[in-house]
Amino acid sequence: MNEIPGMLHAPIVGETVAGEAAAALKQVKALVKGISSNTFDLAEALHKVKKNKYYAPKYNTFSEYAKSLDVTVSKVYYLVKLVEVMEAVGVPREQYEPVGIVKLRTICRLELIDGNDEPKMYDGLPATDHIKMLVGATSLTPEQVEEEVKKRLGLMGEDAMVWVNFPIKLAARNKWDEAVTLAQKNIGSTGQDAEGNYVDASTGRCAEIIAASYVQDPNNHPEGETILSDLDGGMGTK
């Protein structure tokens, strides 16, 4: 009886992959529990699970798997992104690990690809060059790295990000949530997350749109008052 090519090898390959998946999932579980204190071990293990889809078939998506772990989902994603970015720019672990999680998390805020799936450029140079430079600048403090990344993202001066915190009544909060939801519908998606799902505009972006809408409405200003936004694109009156 003639053997069918690959007939004996397919089950072996399947068993090998299943074994690798089980080992990877077991490693992540152990690292999350603190058996190993090296965060970079956990980052690489999570990246391996996501890249090879070892979370299936028990979980449909990596997001579902991440939510099952005894660690915050945000931490899972920034650790995975850290390894993904370093792998994409060709920086090995022995070079990026000494930089530390805090600085690497900031550096990885630089996007590698723009909205047209083209290499992202900052100041005329591809993001890969900037990332390699910042990883190699070991003398920079976390605060200095933060400033360098903000410069490249254009988040300096009036575009700097700030927090606004104030108490409001529950009824007002409900109206605010309603306004944010409406603004998100009007703005549309602003990109995609790690799973390819479309992402709504941030609350901060919605607040900007809501404030501009109120300021630019002439019905909200005393008669005869000039609305600066009509003249120079700013938000204000005189």
Image (cartoon, rainbow, N blue to C red):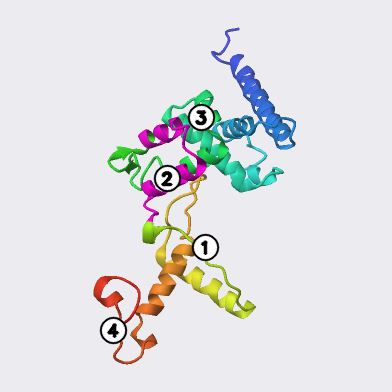
Q: Please state, as top left, top right, bottom left or bottom right, where the C terminus lies in the image.
A: bottom left
- Residue for point 64% across, 20% down: 16
Q: Position of residue 182 (x, y in %)?
A: 47, 71
Circle 4 residues within 10 Å: few <14, some 14–19, many ≥20: some
- How far apart are the alpha carbons under marks 4 and 2? 38 Å
Which residue type carries mark 2?
Val
Segment colored magenta: 129-156
Residue hosting label 3: 96
Residue hosting label 2: 149
- How far apart are the alpha carbons under marks 3 and 1? 31 Å
Q: Can the viewer see residue 108 in this picture?
A: no
Q: Are marks 3 and 4 in contact (CB under 8 Å)?
A: no
Which residue type carries mark 3?
Tyr
Q: Nearer the viewer, residue 196 or 226?
A: 226
Q: Are marks 3 and 2 in contact (CB under 8 Å)?
A: no
Mark 4 or 1, nearer chain start: 1
Which residue type carries mark 4?
Thr
Circle 3 residues within 10 Å: few <14, some 14–19, many ≥20: many
Picture disc at residue 226:
4
Q: Position of residue 17 (x, y in %)?
A: 62, 24
Q: Is residue 236 above or below residue 157?
A: below
Q: Quadrant of residue 54?
A: top right
- How far apart are the alpha carbons under marks 3 and 2? 17 Å
